[in-house]
Amino acid sequence: MVDLLLTESSNPYIGIVILLVLGIAVAVGSILMGWFLRPRVENDSKKEPYECGITPVGDASDSIPIRYYTTAMLFLLFDAEAVFLWPWAVAVRGAGFFFAAEALAFIGIVGIGYIYVWRKGAFEWTKN
């Protein structure tokens, strides 16, 4: 069977197609198995916001302001800075003034972004 797929006249992308079909089949199969095998017992205690015996206050669907999204986006932004500065730090040996000026301009732009985010209060967990 494998020799049949790997002949010279076969499409070179057949392996990718097979991998894609198998990946989709595993994903769909996992979802369907979970749907067929799950318990279908409705229970009022499952709809409560707490299951530890404490009387709940408020509704279970109230939104809680979580600042993690902002923190994660800022981490990605400043982590990308490190990704772009690493090759510069490695290649700086023997570089001229123009090369150093470009790197300083990049650091300056990221620094201005950092100051802007700081003044907007994105680093504070609670808003006053």
Image (spheres, rainbow, N blue to C red):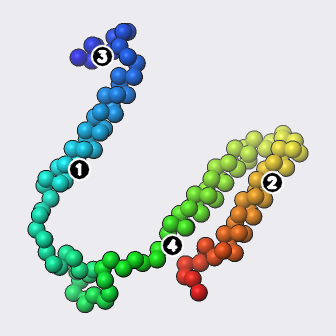
As shown in the figure, which amino acid type bears the numbered disc 3?
Leu
Q: Helix, strand, or loop for circle 1?
A: helix
Whole-percent x, y for residue 87 in the image? 69, 44
Disc sitting over residue 31 in the figure: 1
Q: Are marks 3 and 4 in contact (CB under 8 Å)?
A: no
Q: Do the residues labelled 3 and 2 touch (CB within 8 Å)?
A: no
Q: Quadrant of residue 26?
A: top left
Q: Are marks 4 and 1 in contact (CB under 8 Å)?
A: no
Q: Helix, strand, or loop for circle 3?
A: helix
Would residue 116 be found to the left or right of residue 54 on screen? Answer: right
Reading the image, the residue beneath label 2 is 105
First in sequence, mark 2 or 4: give its number: 4
First in sequence, mark 3 or 4: give its number: 3
Quarter of the figure that contains the C terminus: bottom right
For the residues marked 3 and 4, what is the alpha-carbon distance in whole angstroms? Answer: 52 Å
As shown in the figure, which amino acid type bears the numbered disc 4?
Arg
Would residue 98 be found to the left or right of residue 47 on screen? Answer: right
Reading the image, the residue beneath label 4 is 67
- Residue at 51% across / 73% down in the picture? 67
Q: Helix, strand, or loop for circle 2?
A: helix
For the residues marked 4 and 1, what is the alpha-carbon distance in whole angstroms? Answer: 31 Å
First in sequence, mark 3 or 1: give its number: 3
Reading the image, the residue beneath label 3 is 5
First in sequence, mark 3 or 2: give its number: 3
